[in-house]
Amino acid sequence: MASVLVIEDDPNIRQLIQAALTRFGHSVETAGDGREGLGKFDVGTFDIVISDFLLPDVDGAAVLAQIRRLLPGRRLPAIGISGTPWLMQDAGFDVVLAKPFPLRQLLDAVNRLVIRPEAAEAAA
C-alpha cells in the first residue's frame, strides 16, 4: 500500500494513527515533532505525510514546505490534522482534518490521495 510519515506530538494520537494505518496495510514511520519528522524524511521515501499543525518546535506548514523543497518536481500529498483547523487555511495541505476525527475519514483521505490519486485530482 502506501509508505506514510506521521508527525504528531501527542503520543496517544500518534500511536492510534499508526495502528489504524498499519492495520490496513500501510507502512508507517512516526515522529514526535517537526525536526524528527524532517530527519526521518531525509532517510526515507514516503508516499504521503500526515502532520499535526501545532507542533512544539516547528509548525506543520513549515515542515511541509521544507519536505516539498526536498522533492523538486514531485508533489507529495499531505494531510494536516489539528484541533485548530482554521489556522491551517492556505498552509499547503491537500486535506485538513479537525481533531477529533473518525479514523475512517483519515483512511479515506489516504486512499484518495495515494491509492487513487486520479480521483482526488478529478474532485479538485
Image (tube, helix red, strand yellow):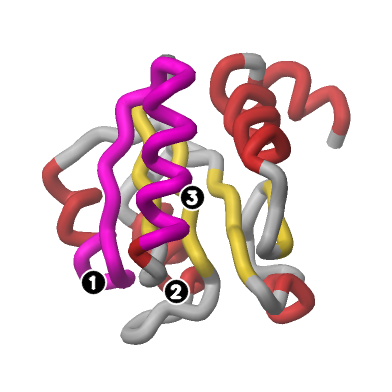
- The residues tagged by marks 1 and 2 sit, at their Cα atoms, a distance apart of 10 Å
- The residues tagged by marks 1 and 3 sit, at their Cα atoms, a distance apart of 14 Å
The residue to which callout 2 is attached is 62
Mark 3 closeness class: few <14, some 14–19, many ≥20 residues within 10 Å: many
| Position in image of residue 37 (x %, y %) | 27, 60
SS of the residue under disc 1: helix
Does 18 lie within the magenta span?
A: yes
Picture disc at residue 35: 1
| Marked residue nearer the N-terminal end (1 or 2) | 1
Q: What is the three-letter code of the residue carrying label 1?
A: Arg
| Position in image of residue 22 (x %, y %) | 38, 27
Q: Mark 2 against mark 3, which lies toward the viewer?
A: 3
In this orientation, which residue lies closer to the viewer: 13 or 36?
13
SS of the residue under disc 3: strand
From this view, report whether residue 14 is shown above or below residue 56: above
SS of the residue under disc 2: helix
What's the magenta region?
Answer: 12-37
In this orientation, which residue lies closer to the viewer: 3 or 12?
12
